[in-house]
Amino acid sequence: MALHFLLRLTGSHRTRAADRQLGGILAFVAGAINAGGFLAVQRYTSHMTGIVSGVADDLATGGFALALVGAVSLMAFVSGAACTALLINWARRRQMDSKFALALLLEAGLLLLFGLVGANLQSLGHLLVPTAVLLLCFIMGLQNAIVTKLSQAEIRTTHMTGVVTDLGIELGRLIYWNRINTANEIHFVRANREKLFIHALVLGLFFVGGLVGAVAFKHFGFSATLPLALLLVIMASPPLIVDFQRA
């Protein structure tokens, strides 16, 4: 039963329910990585809006070195998203069931690498902190592209600006008062309750993940990445096993 659920969750045959469930789980993971990563390297790495604005500010004030760091972080995020697209298209051409699971497995491996890098931050902080920032940006780009691809750009998991905007739009539609004697049904306003639910779910799980990630990092340090990596490996394994058996 659990194997069937996981296969439906990350396999190539998608349903809207599976998309929502995977999106919720990955929002939790993204929140945990983002909050825990901030405690580790003093930077949020899941949203590019602040990074792009920071690059502009640094250029305007003469902070060219900081601007370069921001630009490289942006490129790391873009590279992660591009990597997901490459993996998915490569697997799709070979009709593999694990076209989404491959990127999840790579994310798990990179999380373990982040934990390994972080374990040495005390002694080589001047080198490893920038490396950890770029690694986290790459992971966030990688993950966000996974859910974007499988949900046809309906769900995002690593940054909440669009989620909160869509949530506000649907709430506005929900509380809008339609006059009973409205003659033209074209102007009747109705909220998309399914969309409202999924955005509220993603936002809530991102917050819970951030809380759990921050607390876990505070108490366990970089070893807090191990449960997250294990969760991703468990989710990615069933489609990979199916492809291995076919091969």
Image (tube, rainbow, N blue to C red):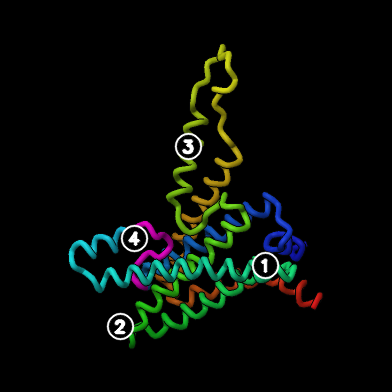
Outermost residue, left direction? Answer: 61
Q: Which residue is mark 3?
A: 169
Per the rendered image, the range of residues in magenta is 41-50
Q: Earlier in the sequence, mark 4 or mark 2?
A: 4
Q: Earlier in the sequence, mark 3 or mark 1?
A: 1
**Picture coordinates of residue 36 (x, y %)?**
42, 68
Q: Earlier in the sequence, mark 4 or mark 3?
A: 4
Outermost residue, right direction? Answer: 246
Label 4 is placed on what type of residue?
Val
The 10 Å Cα crowd at callout 4, few under 14, some 14 to 19, many 20 or more, is some
Q: Which residue is mark 2?
A: 126
The 10 Å Cα crowd at callout 1, few under 14, some 14 to 19, many 20 or more, is many
Q: Earlier in the sequence, mark 4 or mark 1?
A: 4
Q: CA distance from mark 2 to mark 3?
A: 44 Å
Q: Which mark is residue 99?
A: 1
Look at 60% across and 20% down and name the residue there: 185
* Kind of element beneath mark 2: helix
Mark 4 or 3, which is nearer the eye?
A: 4
The 10 Å Cα crowd at callout 3, few under 14, some 14 to 19, many 20 or more, is some
Q: CA distance from mark 3 to mark 1?
A: 33 Å
Mark 4 or 2, which is nearer the eye?
A: 4
237 with respect to 213 (left or right) = right
Q: Quadrant of the C terminus?
A: bottom right
Q: Which residue is mark 4?
A: 52
Q: CA distance from mark 4 to mark 2?
A: 23 Å
Label 3 is placed on what type of residue?
Ile
Look at 56% across and 14% down and name the residue there: 182
Q: Does residue 49 sit above or below 80 in this rendering?
A: above
**Picture coordinates of residue 238 (x, y %)?**
73, 70
Q: CA distance from mark 4 to mark 3?
A: 26 Å
Look at 18% across and 67% down and name the residue there: 62
Label 1 is placed on what type of residue?
Lys
